[in-house]
Image (tube, rainbow, N blue to C red):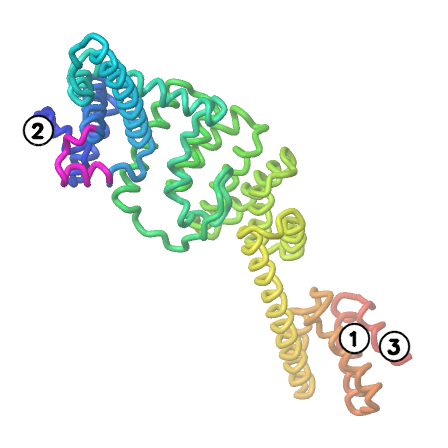
Amino acid sequence: MGESFESAEAVRDYLLGRVSDEATLESIEERLFTDEEFFARVEAAEDELVNDYVLGYLGAAEAARFAASLEGNPERLFKLRLAQGLREKALAERAAAATKAKGSERAGGLEAGPSFLTSLKAFFRRPLYAGAFAALLVAVLAGSIYLFRGGRADELAGLREIYARERPTETRVSGFGYAPHAQLRGDAEARDERRLREIENLLLNEGERRPGARAHHRLGVLYLLRRKLPEAVRELEAAARLDGRDARIRNDLGSAYFETAKVSPRERRYEALGRALEEFTRATELDAGSLEALFNRSLTLQELGLQRQAKESWTLYLQKDSSSQWADEARKNLARLEEARARLKADEGALNRDVLRDFLDAYRARDEARARRIHDETKGLLRGAAVFLQLSRRCLRAKLARDGAAEKESLEALAFVGEFERARHSDFFFLSWPTSTRA
């Protein structure tokens, strides 16, 4: 962007949203954050544009564009409302003065002054007053933010608005409300992309002016939501080093690790999930009431395959939050755990039947090498598929069913396993099973 954007008309086109080229927009916004003189000129042009809209000087097309530009621009909307309020106050004062003047004319005759619109127009067209009015707008805006937010501006408000429709992370980010998880979030809309760049520049500049844990934290959250995960981890780790006792920082750092795990190769995935679990656990220790950290901890336990612990954690979460949309997601995750458990039991049952069938086929065919191999592969499993356990259960079921042939075969197969273990390993554990069962 060179001389082509130096004219007042070009600045006005930018403020009215008539600049559509992304490269030009990016260069304009970069200059707004690096060139104070240019920023002041654009700010003054915006104040003039607000005044022209309030006074009705804009054409129909420009007025429509200006009205459209107010969406997602709370600062400009505030300026507009303030200007409208001042105009209404001035009109009221002018009407009162006119009434007084008429009374004076009846009494002795005074010349009526100029109209309000003429006076207000002259006021705003004088550079000194226009500049003072712009300064007043900025001061009132800053003061209102201070009063309404307890003295602490919320630079992440724009992010909350952008991601109010859907969230790009499966985990919960501190301070953000519910939005459904977007499994495959596409490119941000052009308007959102522009605002995201503006927010990033604001946070970067703030970090330079006031470095600290808070600045790193907010920038890390921005990168996390934008799926710039290495940058998010870097900023949030820096925030945790500076303030390790902030549960929100710990939670969001855990979220960055969790989201990183989802895009990591298999050999690094569990390392990242382990780090995430550590951070979420630490956050719950620092703040037992943190629903975000508890939700994320439950999610991580489930992702690690620790089903019992995950079920307990989700149950605890639902005890603290039973009615929100987050609670609905927690219930869905609990249902998935139950479904996975049922599938596992069914798979284990099928595996057990296959193992016993294969062993008995080999045993009946006198294929001792294959029978011993099947026993070796399962004897370390102290439940389920272990051949000696399955044979003992088969023997007991046959005894109860008065199936003498099956009972006899099971005992002989158990004796075979016991003799093999005694001869090969001098292990009498398995040999004791046929004797105890027969008794």
Amino acid beneath label 2: Ser
Residue beneath disc 1? 419
Quadrant into which the N terminus falls: top left
Mark drawn on residue 402? none
Residue 13, image x and y in percent? 14, 33
Using the numbered discs, state the Cα–Cα distance from disc 3 to disc 2 in whole angstroms.
Answer: 98 Å
Out of 255 and 21, give the one closest to the viewer. 21
* In the image, residue 333 lies in the stretch drawn in magenta: no
Q: Quadrant of residue 390?
A: bottom right
Circle 3 is placed at which residue position? 435
Q: Nearer the viewer, residue 379 or 1?
A: 1
The image position of residue 228, as x and y in percent, is: 37, 40
Task: Name the main secondary structure of what is drawn in magenta.
Answer: helix
Q: Is residue 231 above or below residue 41?
A: below
Which numbered disc flags the more N-terminal residue, 1 or 3? 1
Q: Cβ–Cβ below 8 Å for labels 2 and 1?
A: no
Q: Position of residue 299 (x, y in %)?
A: 56, 51
Q: Hey, which quadrant is residue 78 in on the image?
A: top left
